[in-house]
Amino acid sequence: MLVVNNVHVAYGKIPAVTNLSFAVDEGQIVALVGANGAGKSTVLKTVVGVVKPLSGKIFFSENDITSWGPERRVRAGIVLVPEGRQIFTTLSVYENLLLGAYHRRDHKLRHDFEQIYNLFPILKERAQQTAGTLSGGEQQMLALGRALMANPRLLLLDEPSLGLAPLVVRDIYKTITEICQTGITVLLVEQNINMIIHLVNYVYVMQTGEIKLHGPPQEVFKSEDIKQAYLGG
Amino acid sequence: MLIYTAQQIVNGLVLGSMYALLALGMTVVYGILRLVNFAHGGLITIGAFIFFYTLSVLKLHFILTLVIALLLGAAIGFLLDFVAYRKLRGGPEVALLITSLGVYIFIENTTKLLASPQPYAFRPPALFLQRFALKGIVFSSTDIFIILSALSIMAAFTMFIKRSRLGIAMRATAERIETARLMGIDVNKVIVTAFMLGSAIAAITGFMWGAKYGQISYDMGFMAGVKAFVAIVVGGVGSIPGAMVGGYLLGFTETLMVGTLPPGFAEYRDAFVFTLLLLVLLLRPIGLMGRKEAL
């Protein structure tokens, strides 16, 4: 579904990602793991189009989307839940969800609102509240809900567990699994390997801008050495 | 004394309405681009001259001149963004600021060249020249027009920004421009809309200014633009209701000071406004309705 081919990304003169190639198959949950600064977030930003690669190609459902801007990629179904959630704190919960569906012109919005409210009942309760007043976990739910309102085909998640209590993280991941079961493909970045090891279909391990290892999670994480070497334990 | 005070309040309301309209257009652009658009004052000069030309030279009907000024104002707002600012986006904010000063100087000098360095007498249609007296308070139909249209424009704008899709997208873009793009919002379209709306409003304000003071000149926009900026700072930078409240507060301060102090002080009306600015900056730097910006 998503194919990234020989992509190079740099911020100014500093290379962030070099010679990156990987693929995500439809219906799977794929994880990018690696230590801080390995370039994981850059990969997600490149896939969604806010960061432009210096060279290389990105294909989505067989289309070459390398030159597409983020607006067009969102319409095609690539949706990012950014690191640190980045909800619009001055807007209401309802308005945040509405903006998730900004690019849509269909009339299924009401139905989709109901679905999101079923998935996260707390958001319905707080619909008219300013999003900045939500707790961290609720904000993550809102960020997920907002992304789902876009009708994604490929959902990109940048550290959905960041700064959340372990119990909340478990809930969020339970929801992510449910989302995947509805047919949405997921590519996620995560530091907390134990959280995802039983959840994902495939893992890419990144270090200093390159993919060092990849495979099914049980294989990749079978030795403690690998965890030590690439992920800091 | 009561009548005198009431009279000053009416005067303050009229002046404040114009400041509030200018501040509104300026603050929306600031909210998104962090640009203090000094060229905004130039738009009232352009607006005033468009009205002068269509009313006094072409002798068109007022409604028609209003439509023309709105459309031309919006078109100039579009051009301004397209020609001057678009290429600078993503660069340092100070580059935008300096450019806006340059654009203002360009507008002022072009007006001087095309019109003349002399002020022009501005004659609004007869409808605007009627005078009324209510229990000793004197006001003209121009005053009523300014107050009522300012209030309706502000109400309409508030509805737009609160309820419409594009308005909600505008607030989102002002808060986090990068995340707004992730929602599929075309931020360029949002920015252009902000410029066009603000400029169209400024063009009408140009008519109000001319009708109120009876004359227009190539440099009328400078002080107006600076005062709109002061209104924004007083009200709280980036806050839309703050800009409107700041505009009215400025109008009241100016007229009340001029009206209550001995006649010799009238010359210092601008100084009162800047004193108010200094007081706000000293006592409440985030402005009356401002929020601390998240870093």
Image: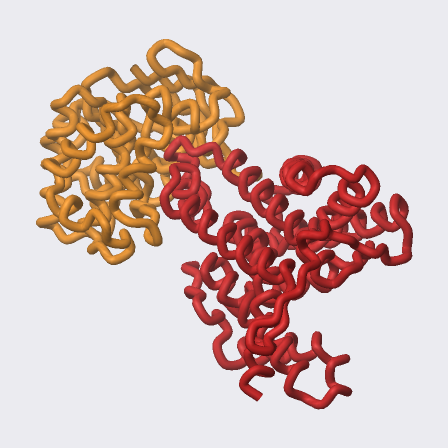
Chain colours: A orange, B red
**Foreground of the two, A122 or A22:** A122
Residue B106, x across and y down, in percent: 80, 48
Residue A28, x across and y down, in percent: 19, 21
Q: Is any part of residue A46 visible from this angle?
A: yes
Residue B210, x across and y down, in percent: 73, 56
Would you say A138 lies left or right of B245 here? left
Residue at the location (47% across, 48% down)? B157
Residue at the location (71% across, 57% down)? B211
* Residue A117 occupies quadrant: top left
Above or below B224: residue B195:
above
**Foreground of the two, B261 or B138:** B138
Quarter placement of the C terminus of chain A:
top left
Q: Is any part of residue A191 visible from this angle?
A: no
Above or below A151: residue B223:
below
Which residue is most to the top?
A62
Residue at the location (67% across, 55% down)? B128
* Residue A43 occupies quadrant: top left
**Foreground of the two, A59 or B56:** B56
Quarter placement of the N terminus of chain A:
top left
Would you say B79 lies left or right of A229 here? right
Residue at the location (33% across, 40% down)? A82
